Image: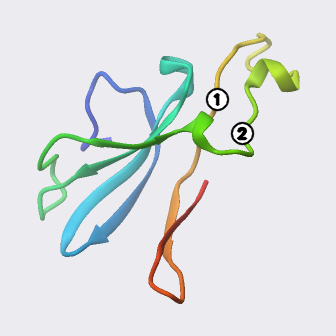
Amino acid sequence: MCCTPPEHSTLDGTLWVEDGVLYMVYCHEWMQIIDGTMVAGPLVPDLSGPAGKPITLFRAHNGPWIREMLSIGEITFGMKLNGWVTDGPFLFRTQTGRLGMLW
């Protein structure tokens, strides 16, 4: 992606606009950091690059429904790896105006 730090292994970027500010919301890959994160990085108006430092919104293990990969017997690329996965953020506003995210 054009707008994420080059040292981050990232996936599943979603564009979000909040109070007129453009953000790339993406996953910092669990295979790189073990406890995957959801990150929001501000973008310049023409979407050509970042407009500031990215902000970690939360870590995968913070979800009460999340299970660690080894604890559920998950095998990734034929290997038993420990970690907590973040994947595919989809942001939305509820009818009451609260910000929600499915992932």
Give whichever of 37, 31 is nearer the camera.
37
Q: What element does badge 2 sit on?
A: loop
Question: x and y percent of residue 30 in the render?
Answer: 55, 26
Say which mark, if any, is on residue 29: none
Q: Residues within 10 Å of mark 2 (few under 14, many from 20)?
A: few
Q: Residue at x 52, y 55 (%)?
A: 89
Q: CA distance from mark 2 to mark 1?
A: 7 Å
The reply to whether dot 2 and dot 1 touch (C-beta < 8 Å) is yes
Quadrant placement of the N terminus: top left
- Residue type at the position of mark 1: Trp
Q: Is residue 61 visible?
A: yes
Question: x and y percent of residue 22 in the render?
Answer: 23, 64
Q: What element does badge 1 sit on?
A: loop
Q: Residue at x 28, y 38 (%)?
A: 4
Q: Is residue 59 above or below residue 17?
A: above
Q: Residue at x 65, y 21 (%)?
A: 83
Question: x and y percent of residue 74 in the render?
Answer: 83, 24
Q: Residues within 10 Å of mark 1 (few under 14, many from 20)?
A: many
Seen as rendered, the residue at the extreme right is 73
- Residue type at the position of mark 2: Ile
Determine whether, in the image, residue 39 is placed left or right of residue 80: left
Question: x and y percent of residue 34 in the render?
Answer: 56, 19
Determine whether, in the image, residue 40 is placed left or right of residue 92: left
Q: Which residue is mark 1?
A: 84
Determine whether, in the image, residue 20 is placed left or right of residue 82: left
Say which mark, if any, is on residue 66: 2
The tag earlier along the polypeptide, 2 or 1, is 2
